[in-house]
Structure formats: structure tokens, C-alpha cells
Image (cartoon, helix red, strand yellow):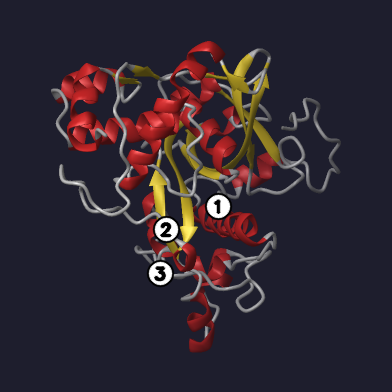
Amino acid sequence: MSSPRTSKKKRSPSTSNEEKKWNAGSVKDSELCRWRLLAKLLGILYWLKNQLYVHFSATYIYQRRSNKPSGGMAGVDAFNIARTGATLEELVPSQNMTDSQMDGTEIPQYKHDVGSVFKIGNYVSLPIKDIDTIASVIQTTGKAVMVWFYFNRDEWVDVPIIKYPDLNLNAGETSRHSVTAIDFTLYNGKKALIIEDSWGQFFGLNGQRVITEDFFQVRNWFAAYPINFAFDDQTQPQPEPQPSPGPGKPKHTFTKPLVFIPWDSAKNQPADLASHESQKTDVVALQNILKYEGRFPSNVSSTGYYGSVTAKAVYAFQVAHKVAPLSELDSLRGRRVGEKTIKVLNEIYSL
């Protein structure tokens, strides 16, 4: 894992005036940032599968926003559009184009037909303000994550800061911006994400910024990532499992509680190795069961590490099977498999 640069890049006068960009209104509730971001996420997704980076068209995505001709959109809308397809940049250019130019581009039917091939099959919405989950997804899948932030313009610096604690997400002066989380690290001893901004290499730290946990926990308001393209997607939810055995149904008997273990970014390993090793076999079985139920990404290996992705899947299992009152489940958010959950697991999956 590479560390971010911590010194500012020297910029030329013609490109370094960030204030001009703000005054032009290019960031405040900017819809273009998320279309370009989604095109990049799809490119990374294709590269992970085929080791070939394909440039997808932001124009094709942008033209199909649900609230056209108005600007602005919800984060989920971007992924819903991607589920209907994304065509290639070579066919429908978008680089260095304004929103009006993108809206005015004519797209022949055959280019739509190409786009229909590249549909994402499913995506995962992640808990907001949970930096551990974002880091876990990046680590275990290699995929980038779309994350949204809100801020006042003078807070969005190389390492964004909180200057206005009472800033309201929906206030007129508030800027809303989506970026790509591509890595995680420690910054001055604190957990942090490395994000790639859509403004280009002359802004931030060579086009990147460092989002500390302090900023993330206050200003994050959406996070999601695509799992797979539809043509190789194996993540569609399975039918709810029944107590009777079925083909391919995992079997395991659980005898002891399992617990969430934080990730030690400095050592790049579970923070409590002894606990991790003692429960690893059971957690592998648990992850296989959660995959069977469609609650854990099937393209992620069952490693036996009980991290944030597993915790989210456990929480979904506990809620679906009504393991305990919702108020009790909400207090742990899937970070423990206790006696009540073990009882349900064994009723369905015991050897």
C-alpha cells in the first residue's frame, strides 16, 4: 500500500487558482463529478476482472440521469443507471466536455447497444461514516468506492478539515461532492482514506486528497461500490434458506461466540492475531453461509477475518432471521455472533 504525498505539488499560475474553480460553481452539488467517477469505477471493475483498463463514457451516463434536464442527483441513481449499461469513451467522448456539451451529444442506437453489454449486476451500499468498512472493501476486493462528502469551500483542502461544525448538508452554501476512495493509510497516527478527486492532477496532492477519520465521521453521507458486471455477476441473492438440506447448502456446527476484530493498518493484519486465529475456521464457515444467503459478496474470498464487511453481513442475517429485538441488534451492528445467533445458525446449518 502506497502512502500519500504530504507536500503540495508546485502548480503553475494558470491552473493553481482553486478559488476560480469554486466561483465557477463546478463543485457545489456538481452532477458531473459523479458521472465521471462512476465511469472510473467501472473502468477499475473491468481491469480487476480482465487486467485491461477500459475507458467508459461519462456522457452516456450523464444523459440518462433520472431528473434530466435538471442538475443534481442521488448517489443511488448513479448505480441504477449503471445497471442499465455504460458505453465506451471511444464511441461517446466525454473528456474535457462541459455538461451542456455532454447533454447535446447525439448517441446513435448502435452505441446504445454496445452500452447494454456493460451493465453492473449488483452494488453494495455501505454504512455511512464507517471508515473501517471502506478500508475493508478496498483491502479485500481491490475495488474503489464512491464516497460523498459535504463541506464549505474553504474546508476542502489537501487534507480536508472541519471549520464549521454546524454546517448543514442541505444549506445553500454547502458543497456536495463525490470522489473515489482508492486506498487507506495512517495520517499523523489517525486512520485515513486516500481519495482521487475529479478536478484533475493540479488540485490537492497531485489530484488526490487525504480524508482523515475525523473529517469522514462528520461529513460522509453516502458510500457504495459495484460488485460485478452483469455478464460475470454471481452475486444475486439466493432464496432464503430453509431448515431442510438443499444442494450446495453449507453445513457447520457453531459452538462458541465470534467477534469483530479491527484491522491494524500499520501492521496490515488483524489487530488481535490470537483471537483471529482461534475463530478463523468458524468465521470461514460463517462467511460461506452468508454467501449462500446472498448477504456477503460471493466474489470476496472467505478468509476467516471478521472485519467490517462480515459484520455488515452478520447484521443483515440477524435482522432477517429476527435473532433478537432490533434495538439490541442495532447496538452491535453485526460485530458479535452470540448465543442467540448461534442457535439460529445451528438450527439451519448444523452438521
- x and y, in percent, of residue 67 in the image: 35, 63
Q: Secondary structure at mark 2?
A: loop
Q: Secondary structure at mark 1?
A: helix
Q: Nearer the viewer, residue 22 or 189?
A: 189
- x and y, in percent, of residue 127 in the image: 38, 33
The three-letter amino acid code for the residue at tag 1 is Cys
* Quarter placement of the N terminus: top right
Spatial separation of the CA atoms under disc 1 and disc 2 = 29 Å
Q: Is residue 129 visible?
A: no
**Left or right placement of residue 296 versus residue 14 in this view:** left
Question: Badge 2 is on which residue?
Answer: 234
Residue 262, label in figure: none
Q: Nearer the viewer, residue 42 or 22?
A: 42
Question: Badge 1 is on which residue?
Answer: 33
- Tell me which residue sits at (78%, 47%) in the image: 15
- x and y, in percent, of residue 244 in the image: 16, 46
